[in-house]
Amino acid sequence: MLTAGQLVDVRRFMGYPMQGDIPATDTSDMAYGWVSSGAWQTLYHRLSTLSAEEEAVVVNYVTTLKTLESAITGAGDNLDTDQAAVWKRNTNEVRDRTRLFNQWRRELCGFIGIAPGPALGNGTTQIVRC
Protein backbone atom coordinates (compact mmCIF):
# COMPACT_ATOMS: atom_id res chain seq x y z
CA MET A 1 0.00 0.00 0.00
CA LEU A 2 1.32 3.44 -0.93
CA THR A 3 2.05 5.79 1.94
CA ALA A 4 -0.08 8.90 2.46
CA GLY A 5 2.83 11.00 1.17
CA GLN A 6 3.17 8.88 -1.96
CA LEU A 7 -0.57 9.19 -2.62
CA VAL A 8 -0.29 12.98 -2.37
CA ASP A 9 2.70 12.94 -4.74
CA VAL A 10 0.88 10.76 -7.28
CA ARG A 11 -2.17 13.06 -7.30
CA ARG A 12 0.04 16.16 -7.49
CA PHE A 13 2.22 14.77 -10.28
CA MET A 14 -0.89 13.76 -12.21
CA GLY A 15 -2.11 17.35 -12.06
CA TYR A 16 -4.92 16.98 -9.55
CA PRO A 17 -5.32 19.56 -6.79
CA MET A 18 -5.05 18.79 -3.12
CA GLN A 19 -7.86 16.82 -1.60
CA GLY A 20 -7.91 18.37 1.87
CA ASP A 21 -9.89 16.44 4.45
CA ILE A 22 -12.64 15.33 2.05
CA PRO A 23 -12.64 11.54 1.60
CA ALA A 24 -12.04 10.41 -1.96
CA THR A 25 -15.11 8.20 -1.76
CA ASP A 26 -17.47 11.17 -1.24
CA THR A 27 -19.96 11.23 -4.13
CA SER A 28 -20.87 14.92 -3.96
CA ASP A 29 -19.60 16.86 -6.99
CA MET A 30 -19.74 20.00 -4.86
CA ALA A 31 -17.12 18.51 -2.54
CA TYR A 32 -14.55 18.69 -5.33
CA GLY A 33 -15.47 21.98 -6.95
CA TRP A 34 -14.41 21.79 -10.58
CA VAL A 35 -12.81 18.33 -10.32
CA SER A 36 -15.11 15.45 -11.22
CA SER A 37 -15.77 13.18 -8.28
CA GLY A 38 -15.67 10.26 -10.74
CA ALA A 39 -12.00 10.99 -11.50
CA TRP A 40 -11.20 11.14 -7.77
CA GLN A 41 -13.05 7.90 -7.09
CA THR A 42 -11.41 6.06 -9.99
CA LEU A 43 -7.96 7.32 -9.04
CA TYR A 44 -8.50 6.46 -5.36
CA HIS A 45 -9.75 2.97 -6.28
CA ARG A 46 -6.85 2.25 -8.62
CA LEU A 47 -4.23 3.48 -6.15
CA SER A 48 -5.73 1.51 -3.27
CA THR A 49 -5.94 -1.77 -5.23
CA LEU A 50 -2.48 -1.91 -6.84
CA SER A 51 -0.75 -5.26 -7.14
CA ALA A 52 2.72 -5.42 -5.61
CA GLU A 53 4.24 -5.20 -9.09
CA GLU A 54 2.11 -2.17 -10.03
CA GLU A 55 2.95 -0.47 -6.76
CA ALA A 56 6.66 -0.91 -7.50
CA VAL A 57 6.19 0.80 -10.87
CA VAL A 58 4.23 3.70 -9.31
CA VAL A 59 6.89 4.12 -6.60
CA ASN A 60 9.55 4.22 -9.34
CA TYR A 61 7.57 6.95 -11.16
CA VAL A 62 7.24 8.97 -7.93
CA THR A 63 10.97 8.63 -7.19
CA THR A 64 11.93 9.64 -10.73
CA LEU A 65 9.48 12.54 -10.77
CA LYS A 66 10.78 13.88 -7.46
CA THR A 67 14.31 13.83 -8.91
CA LEU A 68 13.20 15.58 -12.10
CA GLU A 69 11.24 18.17 -10.11
CA SER A 70 14.27 18.93 -7.94
CA ALA A 71 16.43 19.31 -11.05
CA ILE A 72 14.08 22.01 -12.37
CA THR A 73 14.33 24.08 -9.21
CA GLY A 74 18.06 23.38 -9.01
CA ALA A 75 18.49 24.72 -12.54
CA GLY A 76 17.66 28.13 -11.12
CA ASP A 77 21.13 28.16 -9.56
CA ASN A 78 22.64 28.53 -13.04
CA LEU A 79 20.39 31.29 -14.36
CA ASP A 80 22.81 34.02 -13.39
CA THR A 81 25.71 32.56 -15.40
CA ASP A 82 25.75 32.89 -19.15
CA GLN A 83 29.31 31.72 -19.65
CA ALA A 84 32.18 30.71 -17.37
CA ALA A 85 35.52 29.72 -18.83
CA VAL A 86 34.61 27.21 -21.54
CA TRP A 87 31.34 26.21 -19.88
CA LYS A 88 28.21 27.85 -21.25
CA ARG A 89 24.83 27.18 -19.75
CA ASN A 90 21.92 25.79 -21.71
CA THR A 91 19.64 28.82 -21.93
CA ASN A 92 16.72 26.41 -22.38
CA GLU A 93 17.59 24.24 -19.38
CA VAL A 94 14.53 25.07 -17.30
CA ARG A 95 12.22 24.64 -20.30
CA ASP A 96 13.87 21.36 -21.30
CA ARG A 97 13.75 19.98 -17.76
CA THR A 98 10.13 21.07 -17.34
CA ARG A 99 9.19 19.39 -20.62
CA LEU A 100 10.87 16.13 -19.51
CA PHE A 101 9.20 16.37 -16.09
CA ASN A 102 5.76 16.88 -17.65
CA GLN A 103 6.36 14.03 -20.10
CA TRP A 104 7.02 11.67 -17.17
CA ARG A 105 3.93 13.01 -15.39
CA ARG A 106 1.79 12.15 -18.43
CA GLU A 107 3.37 8.70 -18.62
CA LEU A 108 2.36 8.13 -14.98
CA CYS A 109 -1.21 9.15 -15.91
CA GLY A 110 -1.12 6.70 -18.81
CA PHE A 111 0.13 3.87 -16.61
CA ILE A 112 -2.59 4.48 -14.02
CA GLY A 113 -5.19 4.97 -16.76
CA ILE A 114 -6.48 8.37 -15.62
CA ALA A 115 -6.46 11.49 -17.78
CA PRO A 116 -4.09 14.25 -16.65
CA GLY A 117 -5.68 16.58 -14.13
CA PRO A 118 -6.46 20.26 -14.60
CA ALA A 119 -3.02 21.39 -13.40
CA LEU A 120 -1.28 19.23 -16.03
CA GLY A 121 -3.73 19.34 -18.91
CA ASN A 122 -3.36 17.41 -22.13
CA GLY A 123 -0.11 19.03 -23.27
CA THR A 124 -1.56 21.04 -26.12
CA THR A 125 -1.71 24.79 -26.57
CA GLN A 126 -5.15 26.39 -26.60
CA ILE A 127 -6.13 29.81 -27.87
CA VAL A 128 -8.92 31.39 -25.87
CA ARG A 129 -10.80 34.40 -27.22
CA CYS A 130 -11.86 37.00 -24.72
Image (cartoon, grey):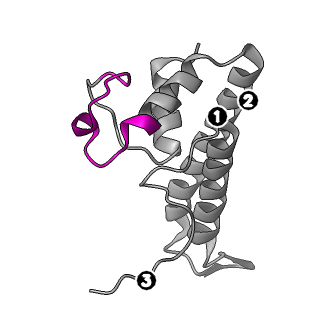
Q: CA gap, disc 1 to disc 3?
A: 34 Å
**Disc assigned to residue 63:** 1
Q: From the top left corner, tell me how far across and down residue 64 is, in percent.
A: 67, 40
Q: Which residue is mark 3?
A: 127
Q: Quadrant of the C terminus?
A: bottom left
Q: Residue at x 64, y 34 (%)?
A: 63
Q: Earlier in the sequence, mark 2 or mark 1?
A: 2
Q: Quadrant of residue 97?
A: bottom right
Name the element at disc 2.
Answer: helix
Q: Which residues are magenta?
A: 23-39
Amino acid carrying mark 2 in the image: Val
Amino acid carrying mark 3 in the image: Ile
Q: CA gap, disc 2 to disc 3?
A: 36 Å
Amino acid carrying mark 1 in the image: Thr
Name the element at disc 3.
Answer: loop
Q: Which residue is mark 2?
A: 57
Q: Earlier in the sequence, mark 1 or mark 3?
A: 1
